[in-house]
Amino acid sequence: MIEARHLRVLRAVAASGSFSAAGRELGCTQPAVSQQMKALEASVGTPLLIRSGREMRLTQAGEALVRHAAGILAGLTAAEEEVAAIAGLRAGRVRLVSFPSGSSTLVPTALAALRAAHPGTRVSLEEAEPPQSVELLREGDCDVALAFRYEGAAQEDEWDDLVVRPLLTDRLVALVPERHRLARTAPSGSIAIGELAAEPWIAGCPRCRGQLIEVCESAGFTPRIDFATDDYPAVVGLVGAGLGVAVLPQLAVESVRPRGARMVTLEPAVRREIVALTLPDLAQVPAVAATLEQLARAAAR
């Protein structure tokens, strides 16, 4: 019979490549890891690891078991949390992963409301951009992923295996220095991206950077990117210093104070869909469901 604790040890060994590294990750000793791996191999009746000196590789059976471990552990977590809620413990734990502009805008409001409504629920927060955040969810390393995808730029079936909670539609806006010619000559506050074709550019995160290039090329030019940074305040600061122009999601601009920069609407509109994702089993966990609900309410404000 396969035990959940043995599966967690196997995943740690597979990810780290050694018993000692897995022990450090799990907070136990190397002999304890070795003992649990022997017990797991005995329970399944076949070797799961190939040990060659200091190197360690998974057998075919080991690879199969690791592949199924995330779903198994997610199912067990769902069962444990639901039973705890039915028993009246009113406890829960949610591991949330969000992209930075979501962390500074939607997440604080949602988590404050969640804590007020369910003080026994603990939430941890890490930051990662999609698709990394989505992979963390699929691998069982988080319970909820705040993610986004651009309209017309993503595979329609990329999230078919997940529960998708739509939150809001975020529009891309241009940022220009406040003394820029377009900051003064666009009284409507709206410009075509082609009007920025000759400008130096400051690009954002890799996914936003790819979308920027795609949008610019569809307008007939390739942007000259002088600076690239994942830090949105740095993008705004560079624009404010007159070093170039940028296109950012409006949510990202709202998360910082754009000193020295002016936000200008782009036409035609380019939008991204912001969603909260979880696994089907985890969607049944009361703490996860409550987190999804509060994220949706925060987005609606």
Image (cartoon, grey):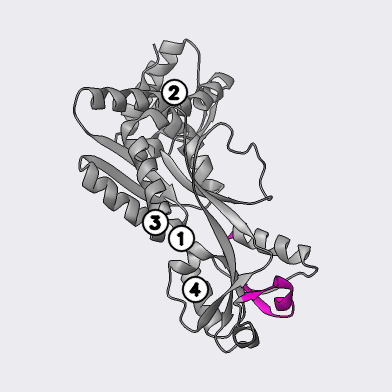
> Residue beneath label 3, please?
301
> Looking at the picture, which amino acid does disc 4 mark?
Ala
Please tell me whether mark 3 or mark 4 is closer to you in this view: 3
Q: Residue at x 54, y 30 (%)?
A: 57
> Looking at the picture, which amino acid does disc 3 mark?
Arg
Residue 74 vertical position relative to residue 25 in the rendered view, above or below = above
> Residue beneath label 4, please?
234
Query: In the rendered view, does 60 fall on the left or right side of 153?
Result: left
Cα separation between marks 2 and 1 = 32 Å
Residue 231 at what x, y percent from top left? 49, 67
Q: Residue at x 51, y 75 (%)?
A: 236
> Residue beneath label 2, please?
72
Question: Which of 122/2 is in front?
Answer: 122
Cα separation between marks 1 and 3 = 16 Å
Please tell me whether mark 4 or mark 1 is closer to you in this view: 1
Residue 184 vertical position relative to residue 143 in the rendered view, above or below = below
Residue 253 vertical position relative to residue 93 in the rendered view, above or below = below
What's the magenta region? Answer: 190-206
Query: In the rendered view, does 103 fall on the left or right side of 152?
Result: left
Cα separation between marks 4 and 1 = 13 Å
Residue 115 at what x, y percent from top left? 24, 47
Q: Say what secondary structure mark 1 lies in.
A: helix
Please tell me whether mark 1 or mark 3 is closer to you in this view: 3
